[in-house]
Image (tube, rainbow, N blue to C red):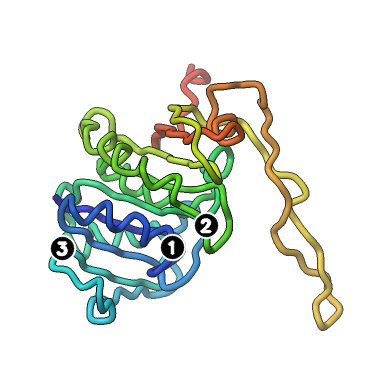
Amino acid sequence: MNILLTNDDGWGSKGLMTLLPHLLPLGHVTVVVPDGPRSGMSNAITVTQPITLRKINSQLSTLNSPSLDVYITNGTPSDCVKLAINVLFNGDASAIDLVVSGINHGSNAGINLIYSGTMGACFVAGEHGIPAIGFSIDDLSADADFSFMDPHIDTILSEALNAQRSTLNAILNVNAPKGPIQGVRWTRQGKAHWEKEMKPFTMDNGETAYTLSGYMVNDEPDAEDTDNYALEHGLLSIQPCTIDMTLYAALR
C-alpha cells in the first residue's frame, strides 16, 4: 500500500509526527510537505515561481526506514499532492491508495474548511479519485496534546481505506476537541462565520496595516448534527465532504 502524508506545517511538526507511526505499519509512506508553515492556503497552487522538490531522507537519523521517503518543497499543501502524483508517481494517481493530511494545529470545522491548507491537499486527492483524510485538533498550540486523539486514528484510517474509491471518493474532515474526547460523531459542516477579523497596527513608517485576528461564530448553535456542535461538546467530528460545489437545489 502506498500512502501519501502531507500537512501545512512542514516536516517535524508534532501533528505530522503523531500520524507517522500509525501509517508506517500499513505500507510505504511518502511524505511531501512544505518547507515552512502554509496555514490558510486553502487550495492555493504556486503559479508565479518554480516549485522545488528535495528529498531529505539522509537527514532523518533514527527515522530512516525502507518504508519511508520524505520530501520538502517550497510549494503549498495542494502543490505537495500534485508533485507526488505527477513527479514521484509518474502521473499515476491510482498508485496512491490514501492521502493523509495533518494533524493540523487548530480546528478545520465549519467555515474553516474552505480556508484550510490541510484540507486543500485532501481536495486535490479527491480530484484524482484518491481517498483522503484531513486530521485537525481544536488547539492552536505548537505543543498541542494529541494523546486523547491518538487512540482514534487507526479506526478513522480504516474508515477511509474501506471506502470504495470509485463510488464514494471519500474525503474525511476529522476534527478532535482539545482535551478528553467524549465520543465520536459523523457530522455535517456547520454554518459559521468570522467576526472582527482585521486587527490594525501602526508600522514604523506610520502607515496602518492589519493582521488576521477575530473569532468564529457558530450560526446554528442548537443544531446537534454539525461539526461545530461536536467540538463544543467534546466529541470528535468526522465530516465526509466532496469537491463538487454545485448547489443542486438551484438548478433549473
Asked if the residues shown at circle 1 and circle 2 are in contact, with their CB atoms under 8 angstroms apart, the answer is yes
Q: Is residue 21 visible?
A: yes
**Circle nearer the viewer, 3 or 2:** 2
Tag 1: residue type?
Lys
The residue at the point 47 percent across, 34 percent down is 237
Across and down, in percent, residue 89 comes to 17, 60
Give me the disc on residue 14.
Answer: 1
The residue at the point 46 percent across, 30 percent down is 183
Q: Quadrant of residue 56?
A: bottom left
Q: Is residue 35 above or below residue 124?
A: below
Q: Residues within 10 Å of mark 3 (few under 14, many from 20)?
A: some
Q: CA distance from mark 1 to mark 2?
A: 8 Å
- Disc 3 is placed on an element classified as loop
Q: Is residue 22 above or below residue 163?
A: below
Across and down, in percent, residue 221 comes to 67, 26
Q: Residues within 10 Å of mark 1 (few under 14, many from 20)?
A: some
Q: CA distance from mark 3 to mark 2?
A: 27 Å
Q: CA distance from mark 1 to mark 3?
A: 20 Å
Residue at image mark 2? 144
Q: Residues within 10 Å of mark 2 (few under 14, many from 20)?
A: some
Tag 2: residue type?
Ala
Q: Earlier in the sequence, mark 1 or mark 3?
A: 1
- Disc 1 is placed on an element classified as helix
The residue at the point 58 percent across, 40 percent down is 111
